[in-house]
Amino acid sequence: EVQLVESGGGLLQPGGSLRLSCAASGFDFSTFSMNWVRQAPGKGLEWVSYISASSRYKFYTDSVKGRFTISRDNAKNSLYLQMNSLTDDDTAVYFCARDPPNCYDGSCLHGHDYWGQGTLVTVSS
Amino acid sequence: TVLTQSPATLSLSPGESATLSCRASQSVGTYLAWYQQRAGQAPRLLISDASNRATGVPARFSGSGSGTDFTLTISSLEPEDFAVYHCQQRGNGISFGQGTRLEIK
């Protein structure tokens, strides 16, 4: 059974940093590209970042470029999101989401087939 | 690419059919997905590539469209279908619509 379990969320002040983790199990993590998607309270979904299976390709939404860094450790079946210089606008539930197997390295055109339950990040003074 | 979903809220009764729309500001080909999100839960993939049902998704869910106009149809609504539905495009970067809330009338 595919499982994605996020952790690392919490309450912090503006300007702070946080590292989110996503532990994957039930599939060959090293062969799938992964994503972070967030959802602000009462709002819609917003794609945040993508990393290819090999880590060669990394993409970010404009609002987090230069502040967030996506990474993965295939030996540990884990995905990470390092978040720096956090602002109130970063308050959201952060989900990790898997891309399906029929994707190319650095490019995926299909929907995310598995999602974790999310971890809440609250940025407030 | 901006995705605009309509209506924002749809009020229907169990047994009725629902038609949800997603319009893209530019062509995304058929690289359009639909997700269902029940309250307090993670999104669940329903439809990928505009019309391909994901594994385990009931046949009452169907997707259609290409280019800029897409539709999710749910025939004969079940109580568990009342949720928020999101569309997502991956034809030009990645973006989501703002969601359509399907509520019980």
Image (cartoon, coloured by chain):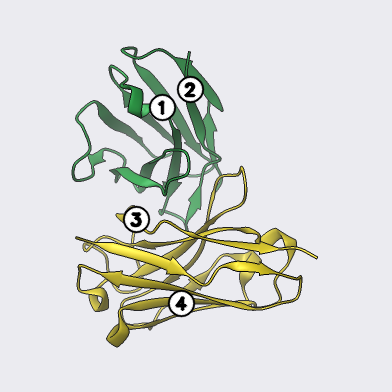
Chain colours: A yellow, B green
SS label for mark 4: strand
In 3D space, how far apart are the residues under numbered discs 2 and 1 (Cα atoms)? 5 Å
* Label pair 2/1, CB-CB below 8 angstroms: yes
Which residue is identified by label 1? B82
Residue A116 seen in the current view: yes
Residue A41 percent location from the top left of the image: 62, 48
For mark 3, does the 10 Å Cα neighbourhood hold few (<14), some (14 to 19), or many (20 or more) residues?
many
Residue drawn at 54 percent across, 24 percent down? B9
A8 lies above or below B93: below
Residue occupying the far right of the picture: A125
- Determine the CA span between mark 3 and mark 1: 21 Å
Binning the other alpha carbons within 10 Å of mark 4 as few (below 14), some (14 to 19) or many (20 upward) gives many
The residue to which callout 2 is attached is B103
Please tell me which residue is depicted at 61% across the width and 42% down the height of the picture: A42
Numbered badge on residue B37 = none
Give me the residue at 37% from left, 68% from top.
Answer: A34
Give the x, y percent position of residue A7.
47, 70
Residue A83 makes an appearance in the image: no
Q: Are the residues at dot 4 and dot 2 in contact (C-beta closer than 8 Å)?
A: no
Are labels 3 and 2 on one chain?
A: no
**Image location of residue B74, percent across then percent down:** 32, 24
Q: Of the residues shown, which amino acid type is indicated by label 4?
A: Tyr
Sequence-wise first label, 3 or 4: 4
Element type at marker 1? Answer: loop
Amino acid tagged 1: Phe
Q: What label does residue A112 carry, if any?
A: 3
- Count of number-bearing discs: 4
Location of residue B12 with respect to A30 vertically, above or below: above
Label 1 Cα crowd, 10 Å radius (few <14 / some 14-19 / many 20+): many
